[in-house]
């Protein structure tokens, strides 16, 4: 099996055998086997990416997996479900936020590649918008007060409940405001999921007290992105304090 791995991958697995706890060794062995399968099948290694639940079943926590990513042992991406595709497709995050559809491969399985939206298997990498996040600023959503804030200003406050908009904002908040999240809206019989998500994104951008944030679709109908937009600050309510939910 190790004969089909790159030198970097072999070193990672060998280091795990010598230095890491058994559960880490088991995870890297599992990923090495997946890489070998991909090599034998002659396909993109991401076609054999391992789902997060497979690795947590080996007694790894999500923070264990984040450590493996940060140390350069593995790469992660979120799988996008598109029934019409013949291959698996993924969106590459720019942070350590995981979701239930996060998958992993050994680092250096394949170099990161730019692929068009309708390309083959591998990673979709979205351009990084110009926004305040470069200085560490991200939005904040307070579900109790139903207020969305950014740069200490209230961007939008919901006077009446809006289940779909609030579900999207809650998902962003729980994930720490990554650039992209998968559609968090549960399926509804008789409703087109892509149209409902697009309508929700449009309503998120409407009726903002201050135009500081713009939401947009990811081009697949299955994900949402956010970015900051330039706006002249105006006097508004102070942003309410927010208690962040502890990461899994």
Image: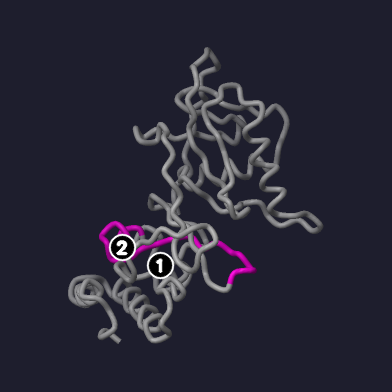
CA–CA distance between discs 1 and 2?
10 Å
Judging depth in this view, the residue of 232 and 64 nearest the camera is: 232
Question: Residue 170, how many percent across, how many down?
Answer: 57, 43
Q: Which residue range is magenta in the image?
A: 66-85
Query: Closer to the N terminus: mark 1 or mark 2?
Result: 2
Q: Are marks 1 and 2 in contact (CB under 8 Å)?
A: yes
**Helix, strand or loop status at disc 1:** strand
Question: Residue 79, how many percent across, how many down?
Answer: 51, 63
At label 1, counting other C-alpha atoms closer than 10 Å, the crowd grade (few under 14, some 14-19, many 20 or more) is many
Residue 53: say if magenta. Answer: no
On residue 216, which mark appears? none
Q: Which residue is mark 2?
A: 68
Q: Quadrant of residue 56?
A: bottom left
- In what quadrant of the picture does the N terminus appear? bottom left
> What residue appears at the point 45 percent right and 44 percent down from the top-left corner?
176
> What residue appears at the point 48 percent right and 44 percent down from the top-left corner?
245
On residue 104, which mark appears? 1
Question: Residue 65, how many percent across, how many down?
Answer: 36, 62
At label 2, counting other C-alpha atoms closer than 10 Å, the crowd grade (few under 14, some 14-19, many 20 or more) is some
Left or right, 79 with reference to 205: left
**Helix, strand or loop status at disc 2:** helix
Question: Residue 84, how many percent across, how many down?
Answer: 64, 68
- In what quadrant of the picture does the C terminus appear? bottom left
């Amino acid at each position: 099996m190790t004969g089909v791995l790159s030198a970097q991958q072999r070193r990672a697995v060998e280091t795990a055998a010598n230095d890491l706890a058994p559960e880490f060794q088991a995870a890297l062995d599992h990923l090495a086997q997946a890489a070998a399968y991909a090599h034998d099948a002659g396909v993109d290694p991401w076609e054999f990416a391992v789902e997060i639940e497979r690795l947590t079943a080996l007694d790894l926590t999500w923070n264990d997996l984040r450590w493996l990513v940060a140390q350069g042992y593995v790469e992660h991406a979120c799988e996008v479900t598109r029934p019409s595709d013949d291959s698996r497709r993924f969106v590459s995050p720019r942070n350590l936020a995981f979701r239930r559809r996060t998958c992993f491969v050994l680092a250096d399985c394949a170099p990161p590649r730019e692929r068009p939206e309708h390309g083959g298997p591998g990673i979709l990498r979205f351009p990084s918008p110009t926004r305040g996040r470069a200085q560490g600023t991200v939005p904040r959503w307070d579900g109790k007060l139903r207020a969305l804030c950014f740069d200490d200003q209230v961007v939008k406050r919901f006077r009446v409940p809006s289940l779909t908009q609030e579900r999207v904002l809650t998902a962003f908040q729980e994930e720490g405001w990554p650039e992209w999240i998968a559609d968090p809206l549960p399926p509804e019989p008789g409703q087109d999921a892509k149209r409902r998500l697009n309508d929700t994104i449009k309503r998120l951008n409407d009726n903002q007290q201050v135009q500081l944030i713009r939401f947009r679709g990811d081009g697949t109908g299955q994900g949402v992105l956010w970015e900051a937009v330039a706006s002249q600050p105006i006097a508004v309510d102070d942003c309410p304090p927010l208690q962040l939910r502890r990461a899994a």
